[in-house]
Image (cartoon, rainbow, N blue to C red):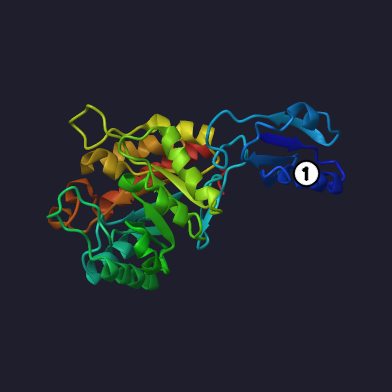
Amino acid sequence: MVVVVKNDIDKAQQEHLVEWLRSMNIDVHETVGEFETILGLIGDTSHVDIDLINSLDIVEKVTRISEPFKNANRKFHPDDTVVDIGGFKIGGGNFQYIAGPCSVESPEQICSIARETKEAGAMLLRGGAFKPRTSPYAFQGMRAEGLKLLEKANAETGMPIVTEIMDISHLELFENVDVIQVGARNMQNFELLKELGHTDKPILLKRGLSSTMEELLMSAEYIMAGGNEKVILCERGIRTFEKYTRNTMDVSAIALLKEKSHLPVIADPSHAAGLSRLVRPLALSAVAAGADGLMIEVHNDPAHALCDGPQALTPSQFAQVVKEAEVIRKVLHGNNED
């Protein structure tokens, strides 16, 4: 339930209303806007008398939210959420490029890619230290050593680190990670999501291989219900009957998620395509659909990459995608960008 409170009121009356609602075991989330204040009611609101609240002089209107996700709902929080990652912002008109290899392989590899992608326009460095692989015999990542190499690249370039967590038990190792990524296979690992809800780090939440948009938003709700509102949604393609691509990029999800939720939405065209030649057109379509960022796999030697080489761009190819994406962004936003 959402209660919209008038701005020109006695704040003591608003505090009294909030105290009364909390006395009914309802959590109240206050969002102060330029023209109105929104009270988001979380919990069992079935016993709350809407007519009574509507009759109060300080109340503009009361609306029940039909969707099961509350914290992530745009009705609950009309303004775009902006996630700040070490001074680099995503959401609310702020766009970021996240680039790097599928897997960290060596100090020379990760540092070289970090330098080249930063020069091309990337502000955040992605790289897998713990790798979920379909085959138990495939390269599983360098694990803790991989995290140390990401820290080394961060020290050299200043690029915040984005990397995937596989298990709650690994959380202590992520102390120096700037953005914790929850991969598609863990999108509904609810125990992990609840634990991440108690952290203060931004969480990049990828859509599951066969998950609906509502299921993605409900997973975000798990994190936000724990108190962590720094959630970034990621469309990375879903599994369909199509065999020509690794997954099917759901471009419509970018626009719809931004309509339904206030959270930033980025796209990962690399995992959607599975083929490097398709990354560019998918990336540009995501930008045109209103994405708040792109996460693209970049490798300096894709042919010899230990993980997902066929979908990786070279640094020069990545630089070209950034140039073309910026043209589309200028067309969409003109000179009104932050």
Q: Position of residue 148 (x, y in %)?
A: 31, 72
Q: Which residue is mark 1?
A: 20
- Amino acid, disc 1: Trp
Residue 281 percent location from the top left of the image: 30, 36
Q: How many numbered circles are shown?
A: 1
Give coordinates of residue 191: x percent, y percent. Answer: 41, 52
Residue 297 image position (x, y, % from top left): 28, 51
Residue 324 lies in what quarter of the image? top left
Quarter of the view holding residue 25: top right
Vertical relation: 26 (above or below) 301 = above
Q: Name the side, left or right, on which 262 lies relative to 299.
A: right
Q: Residue at x 53, y 37 (%)?
A: 69
Q: Quadrant of the N terminus?
A: top right
- Residue appearing at x 54%, y 48% in the figure: 225
> Which of 211/6 is in front?
211
Of the pair 294 and 176, the residue shown nearer to us: 176
